[in-house]
Amino acid sequence: MGQAFGCSCSERAEAAAFIGGEAQAATYAEIQQHAARILIAVPDDAVADVARELAGVRVAWNTLRPMQTLANPAEGVRVLPGVAFSIDGAPEAGAWAEHLVSVLGGTPLQIPSARLPRMVTSNYPMLLIATAVMLMRDAGVEEAIARRALEPLARTSVENAFRPGRAAARRAPWLATLEMARQRGLAEEQAGAIEELLRKGERCD
């Protein structure tokens, strides 16, 4: 039997209902009476608040971050199985974290923090697409039409980035972007360093 903890009655009841089965709602004050292991499943910006609530609970902590973006709990149920998770923290808590990943059929990554690569991978494509939509809108194209026009290109570009042997397809847009940056004043020393990194990536492909 599991317990769902939360700051308010409605949050606890909602979490317990979503988990289903014999899950019961409980307060943070009751946590040590019911739980030997605690899984905090909240957005990044809520972790600090929950940690303060649990400040008096003596446990071994570990972080478990999915290499996936989640819009809501229901989507998490659908997309989390099979993905990689970064694990970092106390070894005694890490064993349970690895077990959770194995239950989901995922890949555990023992790295201190995957937050930066996660942020780059999940947020930068959205920023690039939003910029492209803005450019098309400025050229007189309606936003809905611009998004439909760009979607096939964006999807194919992301797929190419993960296909072996597609180094040339991946590299060309970045080299073109680099050349534009040179024309707009990027120092040659910096441009050369970036180009060297791109070419190293090509050789590793």
Image (cartoon, rainbow, N blue to C red):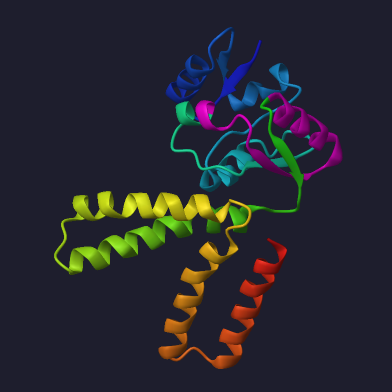
Q: Position of residue 97 (x, y in %)?
A: 75, 33
Residue at 40% x, 60% y is 127
Give the magenta part as a residue range. 77-103
At 51% across and 76% down in the image, what residue appears?
A: 175
Relative to residue 53, is residue 197 depicted above or below?
Answer: below
**Toward which corner of the image does residue 204 lie, by quadrant?**
bottom right
* Left or right of 41 on screen, residue 64: right
Is residue 41 or residue 126 the one in the foreground? 126
Q: Quadrant of the C terminus?
A: bottom right
Q: Quadrant of the N terminus?
A: top right
Give how far across and how far down residue 95 sits, in percent. Answer: 82, 33
Residue 167, relative to residue 183: is it above or below?
above
Q: Between residues 5 and 197, which one lies in front from this camera angle?
A: 197
Based on the picture, tell me whether residue 93 belongs to the magenta stretch.
yes
Q: Residue at x 18, y 69 (%)?
A: 139
Count how many numbered circles sit on residues in the image: 0
69 shown above or below 41: below
Of residues 12 and 55, the one nearer the viewer is 12
Q: Is residue 20 magenta?
A: no
Residue at the spot 61% in from the left edge and 91% down from the top edge: 189
State the image quarter where residue 71 is shown. top left
**Camera-nearest residue between 91 and 174:** 174
Residue 188 position (above or below residue 156): below
Asked whether, in this view, residue 37 is left or right of residue 196, the answer is right
Q: Position of residue 172 (x, y in %)?
A: 50, 70
Outermost residue toward the right in this view: 91
Q: Is 102 on the left-hand or right-hand side of 140?
A: right
